[in-house]
Image (spheres, rainbow, N blue to C red):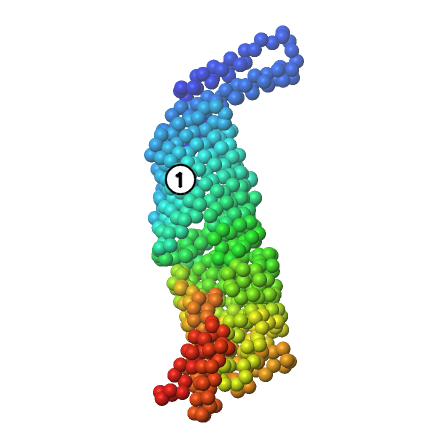
Amino acid sequence: MVGELPPFVGDHAEYTTAFVQGAGHTHLSATPPKGFIVIKRIPTLLFAIVLLALAVAAYYLRDPNQFKQDLQTLAADQTGYKVQINGDIQWRWGLPLGLNAVDIEAKADGETITVGQLTLGISIGSIFTVFDDWKINTLELQDIYWEEPDSIIRISNFNLQDFRAGESTPFAMQLEYTSKNTTSTVITADIAGRFNYGDSGRLRFADTNVSSNIATGTCQGLVSEAQRATGLRQQSQEDLLPVNDLLDYDLNLTCLLTEIPHSPVPLQLVKLVVRNEQGKTQIDLLADNFWGGDASLNSAIDLTAQPLRWTVRTQANNIDSTEFVTWARLKQNWRAKLNINSVVHMRGNSEKALLESISGTTDLDGGSGRMDISSLRDALSAVALISGSDNPVKDWPEEMGYQTLTAQWRVQGSASAIEFTLDNTHAEASGTVDFETRQMDLNGWLRIDEPASQSGLRLPKELMNTKLPMQCLGPLIEPKCRPDKGGVLNLLKQSLTSEKTSALRTRVEEALSDKVPDKLKDTVRGLLGRFGSKED
C-alpha cells in the first residue's frame, strides 16, 4: 500500500493537472536566453512538486479508517501477531504529520497485547517510501497490557523519538512485571536510554538507565531472535525462569549496577553480565568491593536439558571477616582475611527442586588472624571438669590468635558433611541441613592434638588427642555446637573406676558451689547427669 502512487484520475487529478499547466504560463521577457528560462522556472517547479505531494497525501489521508485493514495487515507482517484496531484512527495535521489510534489488540500463541492509545508522528517523505525507510519523529504508546501464560507486563507509557531502522533512537518507558507463579514476583522499573533496531531484526541497547525495585544501574547489550534448539517447553507456576522466552531470544547484556536493594548480601557497584545463546545461559556478578575484598558469582544454566541443569560457582578473595560478622550479627569477634571457593550443582526450575537436588563443595581458608573462642571454651570446660583432672581450659583466652584456619563443607541434597581445622584443633561432623528453614542437625567429633608450641590449646591429658563427641543444632549461620553428653560420658567412664567416680562426684559438687561460673553450672550438671548411677 504505502510507497506506490495511487492510480487515480478523478478528485485531485484535474486540480493538479491544471496547476502544472498554469505554472507554464509565466510572464517572461521577449527573448531571454534558454538557460535563464530554465533557471527562472526552478522555484516554480519545486513549488508545484510540493503541492503535488500534498495532493497525493491528502488522497491517502482523507479518511484513514478506510486503510485500517491494510494497517492491520502491515502490522501483522512486521510482528507475527494477529492485529485488530478496534477504535478509530485520526490524522494529526501539522508538522510532523501523524495519526492517533485507540484500542489496539494483538494476539499470538497464548499472548494477548492491548494498547490503549497510539500516537505516531512521521515525516511527510516517509509516506512515499517502504516501511523500513520510514522516519518516525515521535511514537507514544499508552496503557499497554501484555499477558503471557506465566506473566503479565503493564507499561503505562512508552515513547521514542527520531526512529529510523539502523540508527540510534532515544526511548523511555515505565513498566510493571508480575509473574503468575506461586511467589507472585512483582518488578517495577523506569527505563530510559537508546536503542538501534536493524541488522536482521537485532535490537541493540546503549547507555540505558534502569531504576527498579530489583536493581539500579546502566546497561548496554544486544537482543536477537534465536533459532530454537528445542520445541515449546511445558511451564508451571513454580518456574523461576521463563524458559520458552529464553529459548526464543539470544541475549548479550552488560550492566553496571549501583544498587541491589534486596540482595541477601550487601552489594554496591557490581558488574552484571548476562549471555543467553541457543539455550545456554550464563550469568556473572563481579564485585570489586565486597566486604573489603572482591567476589564473583557465575551461574551456568542449560535450558535445553530436562530438568534444567545449573552450575553455580562462587569465589571471594581477601574478605574482611569483621565486615561479615557485623552483617551476620554474630556475637563472636573475628579478625582475618578470608578466601572462599564454592561449586554447586542443581537441577530443576523451582526453588524446591533446586534445593532438593543441590550438591557441591565449599572451601574456606581463614588464613591467620584472631577469633573469639569463648563458646568452645565454655563447652569444653564442663568436659574438662568432669574428667577429674586439672582443668587447663579455664585458662583459655576469650580471643585467640591463630595461624591456620580451614574448613570444607560437602552437601548432597539435605545430607551435609563438614571438616574444620583451627591450628591444633580438628573437627568433623555430618548430618542434615534444611535449606528451606536454614536449620542444621549435625553430629561428629572434635579433637585437640598436642600443640607444636606452648601457645596451642590444651585439654586434660586424658582428653588430648581424643575424639570428643560433639553435636551442632540450630540456625545455619550460627548453630550451637556442644559436646554430646552421652558420648562424652561413655568416653570418660572407660578410664574411671567406681572409687574414682565417687570421689569425682564429690569434687564436682564442691566445684559447682563456688568455683564454676553460673552460666556453666547447668551444663556441668547435665553432663554429670546419671554419671555413676545404677543405670550406668
Q: Nearer the viewer, residue 418 or 196?
A: 418
Residue placed under numbered mark 1 in the picture:
144
Mark 1 surroundings: few (<14), some (14-19) or many (≥20) residues within 10 A: many
* Residue at screen point 42% across, 26% down: 91
Q: Work out whether residue 37 or residue 484 is closer to the camera in this orientation and state it.
A: 484
Residue name at image x 65 percent, y 17 percent: 35
What x and y, as percent, mark residue 160?
Answer: 50, 36
Near-viewer residue (435 or 330):
330
* Picture residue at 35% right of the left edge, 55% below the top: 182
Left or right: 451 as drawn, with respect to 119: right
Q: Which quadrant would the N terminus be assigned to in this image?
A: top left
Q: Is residue 276 visible?
A: no
Is 443 above or below relative to 290? below
Residue 268 rendering spot, x and y as whole percentages: 56, 53
Q: Residue, x 54% and y 11% (percent of image)? A: 25
Quick check: 249 above or below 469?
A: above
Query: x and y percent of residue 488 in the render?
Result: 45, 82
- Callout 1 secondary element: strand
Q: Judge by depth and name the residue closer to the eye, 2 or 217.
A: 217
Q: In the orientation shown, which residue stands out farthest toward the top?
A: 30
Quadrant (top left, top right, bottom left, bottom right) of the C terminus = bottom left
Q: Is residue 245 above or below residue 469?
A: above
- Is residue 432 in view? yes
Which picture quadrant has residue 241? Answer: bottom left
Q: Whole-percent x and y of residue 292?
A: 60, 59
Amino acid identity at mark 1: Ile
